[in-house]
Amino acid sequence: MSRLVLGIACLIAIYALVLVSIDPWDLVIGGAAAAFLLWASRRYLFPVPPSPIDHLGQRIARLLPFVVAVIRDIVVGTWNVALVVLHLRPLAHPGIVAIPIGARSATGVAVTSLVMTLSPGACLIDVDWEQGVMLFHVLDAADADAVREEYETFYQRFQRPVFP
């Protein structure tokens, strides 16, 4: 029931932001529309009851270091791309590197893909579940093993405690 209430509240907030109005009638209409949309798509959105999140307190505590590491990665990636674009560093060996999925869950793969793609200089190409690899195009693929080690270290140190 709480997922439904949270979903309705979020949709009402989005509706109010789009209308730029918090008039009570607008909120009632938004609530009715939100309730109908969630009711109509309930089998798709809520197919099974949610499972409890393991170690929620520890995950929340490790979220700040994870966010700081992501921001640092974005800043370093932006700097490296800027150096290449300004021709201060040569673009020597761009290429595709296969990063093993390893112990990552489906959510972990999605978070890894998003986080590594946020940083300039890397872009997810594909996830091959059969071979158990994620294919990333990186700015410097001269030492593919070093890239794999860097991604695995980031996962083990920052991401795994929050998004396994």
Image (tube, rainbow, N blue to C red):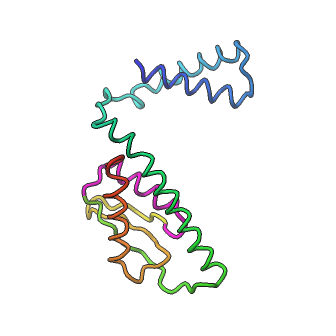
Q: Is residue 36 left or right of residue 63?
A: right
Q: Is residue 39 left or right of residue 62?
A: right
**Which quadrant of the figure contains the N terminus?**
top left
Number of labelled discs? 0
**162 or 91: which is nearer to us?**
162
User: Percent position (x, y) of residue 56?
Assistant: 33, 36
Q: Is residue 110 magenta?
A: yes
**104 or 73: which is nearer to us?**
73
Residue at left offset 42%, top offset 31%: 45
- Report the span colored magenta: 103-122
Give the quadrant of residue 104.
bottom left
Where 18 sits versus 140, above or below? above
Q: Is residue 112 magenta?
A: yes
Residue at left offset 36%, top offset 78%: 144
User: Percent position (x, y) of residue 42?
Assistant: 42, 25
Residue at left offset 67%, top offset 80%: 86
User: Percent position (x, y) of residue 123?
Assistant: 49, 65
Where 40 sits versus 152, above or below? above
Where 124 sits versus 31, above or below? below
| Main secondary-structure element of the magenta-colored stretch | helix
Where 6 sits versus 54, above or below? above
Q: Is residue 97 left or right of residue 101?
A: right
**11 or 36: which is nearer to us?**
11
